[in-house]
Amino acid sequence: MTPSTIAWMRKNAGGLICFVTEDSVGKQLGLDFMSDLLRKVGFNGLVKRPGYGDDPAFSIYVNHVKTATGIRDRDRALTITRLADVVKMVNEGRALDARKIFYDEFYAPGHVPILLGRVGRRFGHTELSLILSRMAGIPPALVIVEMLSDDGGALSKDTVNKIASELGTALISGSEIVSEARRRGII
């Protein structure tokens, strides 16, 4: 992750820039879903399911200890890069080392939300991105952001198609991702 990539996402997408990993990785780091944490401390009345029916994938928000304010592009890039390093360590079977680094190098609350995907149990944007990482054979350490329109909603499919074309990238649907993952036996 680079500061220029964060700047591009911030300027061209507009949604919340989130770090994504699998819930199994989160558990090895001692993380839980924010909705579960809030229930445990007595905020049951605030924990409601959104319209899509599942508890949100949010865990905690963190900053790396070497950041200035945490929100700057270079700060978020550093936080995300080090989070990816920690996830890679978990994937390599070094969960205890990863957990130590996580608790030594990060603090909460911060400016980078960690989302914990429930791959195979839920099929939202968080999980779809993680399914793609499985298909690509890369660690489940990703960054996602929703692209928003100027009227405050999501971008239209036509606009997204145009942007994908300009970037020279493929545009695939969630159902295509799930279908291919099932065909490959990934989920």
Image (cartoon, rainbow, N blue to C red):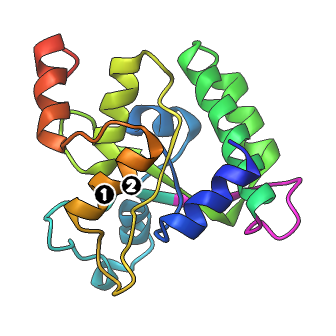
User: Residue at point 36% right, 61% down?
Assistant: 36
- Relative to residue 67, is residue 165 drawn left or right? left
Q: Are marks 1 and 2 in contact (CB under 8 Å)?
A: yes
For residue 107, which quarter of the picture?
bottom right
Q: Amino acid at mark 1?
A: Val
Q: Position of residue 50 (x, y in %)?
A: 21, 73
Q: Position of residue 6 (x, y in %)?
A: 65, 56
Q: Which residues are magenta?
A: 60-72
Q: Position of residue 14 (x, y in %)?
A: 49, 71
Image vertical order of residue 171 relative to residue 63, above or below: above
The answer, for residue 55, to whether it is visible in the render is no
Residue named by callout 1: 160
Q: Amino acid at mark 2?
A: Ile
Residue named by callout 2: 163
Image vertical order of residue 36 relative to residue 122, above or below: below
Image vertical order of residue 111 relative to residue 149, above or below: above
